[in-house]
Image (tube, coloured by chain):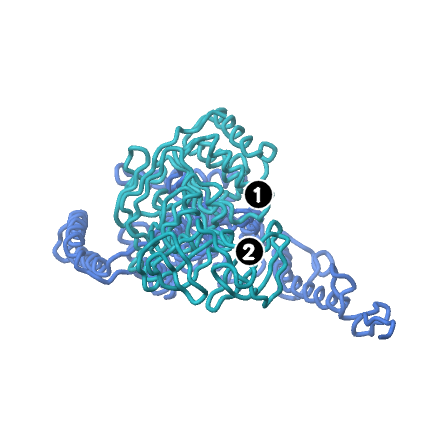
């Protein structure tokens, strides 16, 4: 055997090895660095440029937009506040107190709505700055609907992840049939609905108790979950006319409540599906342990389950918030002036008599983006991994 | 620390459990004495964990009653049963510190903060955790997590401790150490403890009495020495002991057990067509060729430390024999195996029952 041993010499590397081999285990090879950083740089430009373009366009005037493209403020074009003045100064109601007036109007009209079945108080007309109105409307509607959606949705998801439901198929059929009977009786026989509904409900419990024993086929949690997501399979536009007519019947058109309800209900399936996976992924021993320690079902949910699914909850909340914040279809159908939201304001700039007002649009977009960015920054610290480490592994 | 709850008795009365068509427990009758350390021992799938979960209330029995003290708790919610449980995975709350973990059972009972802190400190001191109260579970080693789980169980002084394989996630050395601590703690507190394990060493060392379960049937309930020296049936005899009891096949006629390897005079009388003779590795010894009741060739020698384990191959069976640590046999060497009269057990091969 010769005296040499066969090992790699770092000094004898070829060109390709120098390029593609990482010098130490902690670093990347030169070629990989070039590729990775150039791809990252390209992608950053791809993501950041539209934002940059929106922001600078918001400070352009008509000439700077139409004779462009101009890229750099102060160099290519002189920035102006025209687009912002058009929103604020041109509106006689837009002054420093606009927000206060807007909040007062909101509280007053909400109170008026709540007491309306008892005393009639005429709601105030929104004689106020339009962009403040749309902005506060959007915030109130998006935040409230997201709150209800995430609260109800995560509780539903937890129940479906931890409790086995076995609804009898026959009972569900009975329930649906009785619902139909109530509708038909209310509209054709003429008996009031508040009589029909309790009678039907009592009848349902009676039938479910007596006939229910004989039904064999049952549904499981998987079926319930699928039924929920199936509500999102059809595009929302198919329900827009029935929803419009229902709101018309109860006098909720152009109100905050109308949009809050429809957004909360519409996004419920998404929340349930996302949160269900997070809850199902939790080790069940933690909940069993808490149960033996004496926690109630709600206590376990609040004190053990929610803190551990906080990253998922934060991500779901952010997603729902953005969906509700951007929603256009229902908003455009169900509102006219009082419950106007930002997307409607934005769309209105698209088809004016003076053509598309890109600079005004961009000013509104900037206003719309800011709350979302703030929420994302607030929530992103919860969207961190590794929370479950040390729970059940040895 | 003041003594915990004075021990209360626990009883399983004709407990049955089925998951769908699968019967996991068949009529389990088990009485645990006050203050007793009872170990439920069995292989996986024997129903031992199910029995424990039925007692804890996490699972409901299909039939039968469970009693803790003089209360029938069959239909009682887990939180009102006054039990605490240590899980195999510890089930520590990862978002709570050690102190908050230990104090959680008291927090949900709305014990005032000052009182709670004293109790937490006491419980933590009991398991040497006092320095770590502000750490999170992820910052602890496996043994420390195990202690947190124990402290959380003892902090509220329950009537009964339930432990579901609490030591099986620890390494061998730590397991031995924690076993001793656990035994000491249980003796100091005097709380009735039911402990589930598949590890016979844990069962033998910890228990006042061991209950051996197999396929949902209680095989034997007795003290560790009784289980070892007087197994009720073939399953228990083979389950306990390491290496397990040697078994040879043959027939019993009168007081003579006849097999291919030789005829052996046994201390019982009977007539069993298919009989099994069992004896433990330490109840036999290597004899010179031609001597001893059985004959065979040496298969392997293993030096364990305090003894040499010799495996002898007879016509049909492999026999483990504990020889002195100086013993060195050659593989293939013909030897005899001498049996000691007191260590012979006879079983019926048909049903595994002990022939007495």
- Badge 2: chain ID: A
Residue A365: mark: 2
Pinpoint residue B192: horizontal percent, then vertical percent.
40, 35
Colour cyan maps to chain: B
Q: Within 10 Å of the Cα at label 2, are there few (<14), some (14-19), or many (20+) other Cα atoms?
A: some
| SS class, disc 1 | helix
- Estimate the spatial distance between the alpha carbons at disc 1 and disc 2, rounded to whole Å: 56 Å
Foreground pick, B101 / A275? B101
Foreground pick, B123 / B293? B293
Q: Within 10 Å of the Cα at label 1, are there few (<14), some (14-19), or many (20+) other Cα atoms?
A: some
Residue A37, placed above or below residue B185: below
Say whether residue B272 is left or right of residue A380. Answer: left
x 36%, y 59%: residue: A225
Query: Is residue A260 among the parts visible in the rendering?
Result: no
Pinpoint residue A324: horizontal percent, then vertical percent.
45, 54
Residue placed furthest toward the left: A189
Colour blue maps to chain: A
Res A11 quadrant in image? bottom right
Pinpoint residue B4: horizontal percent, then vertical percent.
44, 29
Pinpoint residue A364: horizontal percent, then vertical percent.
54, 54
Residue designated by label 1: B143
Say whether residue A3 is left or right of residue A54. Answer: right
x 55%, y 50%: residue: A383
Residue B289, placed above or below residue A140: below
Residue placed furthest toward the front: B290
| SS class, disc 2 | helix
- Badge 1: chain ID: B
Query: Is residue B299 among the parts visible in the rendering?
Result: yes
Residue A137, placed above or below residue B256: above
Residue A168: mark: none
Q: Nearer the viewer, mark 1 or mark 2?
A: 1
């Amino acid at each position: 055997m010769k005296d040499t041993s066969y090992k790699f010499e770092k000094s004898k590397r070829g060109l390709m090895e120098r390029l593609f081999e990482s010098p130490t285990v902690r670093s990347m090879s030169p070629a990989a660095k070039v590729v990775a950083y150039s791809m990252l740089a390209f992608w950053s430009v791809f993501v950041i440029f539209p934002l940059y373009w929106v922001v600078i366009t918001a400070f352009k005037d008509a000439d700077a937009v139409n004779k462009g493209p101009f890229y750099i403020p102060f160099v290519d074009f002189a920035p102006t506040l025209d687009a912002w003045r058009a929103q604020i100064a041109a509106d006689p109601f837009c002054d420093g107190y606009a927000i206060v007036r807007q909040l007062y109007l909101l509280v007053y009209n909400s109170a008026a709505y709540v007491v309306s079945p008892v005393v009639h108080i005429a709601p105030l007309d929104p004689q106020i700055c339009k962009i403040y109105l749309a902005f506060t409307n959007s915030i109130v509607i998006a935040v409230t609907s997201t709150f209800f959606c995430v609260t109800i949705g995560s509780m539903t998801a937890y129940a479906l992840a931890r409790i086995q439901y076995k609804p009898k198929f026959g009972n569900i059929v009975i329930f649906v049939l009785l619902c139909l009977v109530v509708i038909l009786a209310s509209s054709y026989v003429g008996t009031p609905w508040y009589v029909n509904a309790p009678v039907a409900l009592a009848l349902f419990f009676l039938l479910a108790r007596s006939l229910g024993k004989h039904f064999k086929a049952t549904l499981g949690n998987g079926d319930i979950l699928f039924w929920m997501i199936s509500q999102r399979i059809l595009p929302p536009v198919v329900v827009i006319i029935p929803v419009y007519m229902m709101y018309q019947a109860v006098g909720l058109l152009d109100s905050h409540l109308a949009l809050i309800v429809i957004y909360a209900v519409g996004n419920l399936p998404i929340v349930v599906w996302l949160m269900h996976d997070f809850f199902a992924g939790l080790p069940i021993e933690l909940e069993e342990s808490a149960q033996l320690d004496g926690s109630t079902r709600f206590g376990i949910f609040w004190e053990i389950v929610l803190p551990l699914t906080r990253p998922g909850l934060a991500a779901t909340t952010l997603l729902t918030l953005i969906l509700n914040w951007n929603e256009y279809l229902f908003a455009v159908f169900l509102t006219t002036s009082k419950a106007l939201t930002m997307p409607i304001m934005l769309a209105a700039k698209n088809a004016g008599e003076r053509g598309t007002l890109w600079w005004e649009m961009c000013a509104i977009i900037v206003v719309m983006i800011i709350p979302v960015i703030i929420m994302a920054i607030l929530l992103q610290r919860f969207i961190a991994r590794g929370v479950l480490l040390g729970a059940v592994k040895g | 620390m003041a003594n915990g709850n004075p021990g209360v008795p626990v009883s399983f009365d004709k407990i049955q459990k089925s998951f769908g068509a699968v019967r996991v427990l068949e009529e389990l009758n088990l009485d645990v004495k006050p203050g007793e350390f009872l170990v439920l021992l069995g292989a996986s799938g024997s129903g031992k964990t199910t029995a424990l979960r039925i007692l804890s209330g996490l699972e409901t029995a299909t039939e039968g009653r469970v009693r803790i003290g003089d209360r029938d708790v069959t239909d009682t919610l887990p939180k009102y049963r006054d039990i605490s449980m240590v899980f195999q995975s510890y089930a520590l709350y990862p978002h709570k510190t050690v102190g908050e973990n230990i104090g959680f059972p008291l927090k949900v009972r709305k014990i005032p903060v000052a009182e709670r802190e004293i109790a937490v400190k006491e419980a933590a001191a009991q398991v040497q955790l006092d320095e770590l109260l502000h750490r999170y579970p992820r910052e602890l080693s496996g043994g420390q997590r195990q202690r947190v789980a124990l402290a959380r169980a003892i902090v509220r002084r329950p009537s009964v401790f339930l432990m579901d394989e609490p030591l099986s996630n620890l390494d061998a050395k730590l397991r031995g150490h924690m076993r001793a601590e656990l035994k000491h703690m249980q003796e100091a507190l005097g709380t009735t403890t039911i402990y589930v394990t598949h590890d016979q060493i844990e069962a033998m060392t910890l228990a006042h009495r061991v209950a051996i379960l197999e396929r949902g049937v209680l095989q034997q309930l007795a003290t560790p020495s009784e289980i070892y020296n007087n197994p009720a049936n073939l399953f228990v005899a083979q389950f306990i002991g390491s290496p397990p009891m040697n078994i040879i096949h043959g027939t019993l006629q009168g007081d003579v057990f006849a097999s291919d390897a030789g005829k052996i005079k046994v201390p019982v009388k009977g007539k069993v067509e298919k009989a099994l003779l069992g004896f433990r590795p330490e109840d036999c010894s290597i004899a010179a060729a031609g001597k001893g009741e059985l004959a065979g060739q040496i298969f392997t020698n293993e030096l364990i430390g305090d003894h040499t384990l010799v495996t002898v191959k007879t016509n049909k069976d492999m026999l483990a024999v504990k020889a002195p640590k100086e013993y060195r046999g050659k593989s293939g060497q013909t030897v005899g195996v001498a049996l000691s009269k007191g260590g012979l057990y006879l079983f019926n091969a048909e049903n595994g029952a002990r022939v007495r």
